[in-house]
Amino acid sequence: MTVWQTKEQLTDLLCSLVEYPSITNSNEEIAIIEYLYYILEDRDYYKKRPSHLNLHPLDDGRQLLTALVKKDEAKETLVLISHVDVVGIEDYGSYQNLAFYPRELTQELHKNVEDLPKEAARDLESGNWLFGRGTMDMKAGLTVHLSLLEKAMAGEFDGNLLLVAVPDEEVNSEGMLAALPALAEIRDKEDLEYKAALNGEPMFSKYPGDPAYYLYTGSIGKTLPGFLCYGKETHAGEPFGGLNANLMVSYLAQEMELNEAFIEKVGGERTPPPLSLMQRDLKFEYSVQTPQAAVAMYNVLYMKQSITELNEKLLQAAQRAKAKIINHYHHQASFYLEGTQTSAFHPDITILTYDQLYKEAVARYGKMEVDRRQNRLVNLRDQGDRDFSTTLVQSLASICKDISPMIVLFYSPPFYPAVSSNDDPFIQHGAKTAIDYAREKFGEELEVVEYFTGLSDLSFIGPTSSTSSLSDLTKQMPIHGNGFEWPTEVMESITMPIINIGPLGRDPHQWTERLELTYSFEKLPQILTRVIHEFFKKDMG
């Protein structure tokens, strides 16, 4: 008996998944994985083959799920990747209590249509959209993958499907990183050959009101560069006796936010420009002393350019900010200081990368002492990756005060490599199959986009599209080697072609997040079924 095939059945399944408020790092993020295990272990296939359904623990107590459906002695296997976590719901305001109840939220919005933006209101009134956190990103994709797994259990495909459901995609992708060794273990144990990974992330609009339907043959790369601004403290009564780190970081924001220099163009695709994801000073108590240090971190996306090229653009932004900071200081001092009055402080700003700052510290104190200081911080660590990265940089800056004020460029996790299978004949065939079938069967026009811009776990399993060496990044990443290691070897051993064919939704990470039901739960499962059949054709081997 099939229970995950019709539009109504899939809508019910989606709602049951969304009702788990699986915000990243919450207990419900663990509970939803257990729920998936529960609904799968009850199926006849897994009652007969319990070893094909497994929970895999992460180091922090969370877990991921793998569910293999094996066709006789077949080796060819397609990996279906989904994530179970969602972002928070603070943006829902008075609707927070309904954010995880899609039917009830959608019904309530019908009573308050005036609360919605015009486009969301039009979708609501069409009667074919379901609102709620996780409906689009990405529990609908997981729902469709479960329907495909059910077809595989019924023997429909001439090959194997392996569902991988992971936590933590929205923060550090620790779930996917933990899945890599699990994939290697399953491959070796079951004698599998991984042909491709299919992700079910939803389509992302290229612009507001974009009517196009997309599939993706790659996933965009993401870096999180940070700037530590280390100024010169002074009393608020002597404002020109130092340099306020808040002033420094504010000029960096002007140089970085939405800067067109970072927009990379590949074919007809463009990366969104940088956005600040965090900016604050590092003074945690009130006093009339100016903040000595401040930090900002930016979301910087890339496709094919190298880390070296990104570094050059980032350092150029810092140089422009430096000139404006110094000019601002002198210009404002001219209004305050009169006659022959001068300040003993004359601002200059040293611009460094983290690697250069580390070498400066070693030159002063020796490698043994610098490493001792950093090891002590590692042992006392009680911060997340981003705050701890900042702490490590600030610690080095504090023992190199003689070269301050300074701006230090560094990187923090998460890092998503840019990956692409756009030129892979196997993936090209799958994409053409999807496009042709969608047009002939449903009259829908699908368009191939090389890079999924919403970030995805495919970055850790697909072939990289940049020529950068990973060491170009990790040497500027203070946390690397200090409690964080990049799993380079296992990533290389699990690399496979990738494609993302997902549902139709709008407004990810917004309170108007919603899913279109007819394409997502009637047409998409049939399109994916056809693609999987094509992928398992023997002449594609």
Image (cartoon, helix red, strand yellow):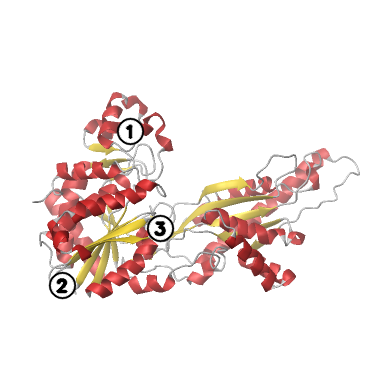
Q: Is residue 124 left or right of residue 535?
A: right
Q: Position of residue 22 (x, y in %)?
A: 35, 46
Q: Are marks 1 and 3 in contact (CB under 8 Å)?
A: no
The label on residue 98 is: 1
The answer to whether 362 is drawn above or below residue 409 in the figure is: below
Q: Position of residue 6 (x, y in %)?
A: 13, 46
Where on the picture, by quarter, is residue 104? top left
Q: Position of residue 333 (x, y in %)?
A: 79, 43
Amino acid at dot 2: Ala
Amino acid at dot 1: Leu
Out of 22 and 262, give the one closest to the viewer. Answer: 22
In the image as oriented, which residue stretches furthest toward the right? 340
Describe the element under mark 2 as helix, strand or loop: loop
Label 3 to label 2, Cα distance in Å? 30 Å
Q: Residues within 10 Å of mark 2 (few under 14, many from 20)?
A: some
At x 29% / y 32%, what residue is drawn? 105
Mark 3, residue position: 173
Mark 2, residue position: 74
At x 20% / y 42%, what residue is drawn? 12
Out of 415 and 274, give the one closest to the viewer. Answer: 415
Q: Residues within 10 Å of mark 1 (few under 14, many from 20)?
A: some
Q: Position of residue 519 (x, y in %)?
A: 20, 46
Describe the element under mark 3 as helix, strand or loop: loop
Label 1 to label 2, Cα distance in Å? 45 Å
For the C terminus, give its image quadrant: bottom left
Regarding residue 498, the answer to whether it shows in the image is: yes
Mark with earlier residue (1, 2)? 2
Regarding residue 219, the answer to whether it shows in the image is: no
The label on residue 498 is: none
Where on the picture, by quarter, is residue 369? bottom right
Amino acid at dot 3: Ser
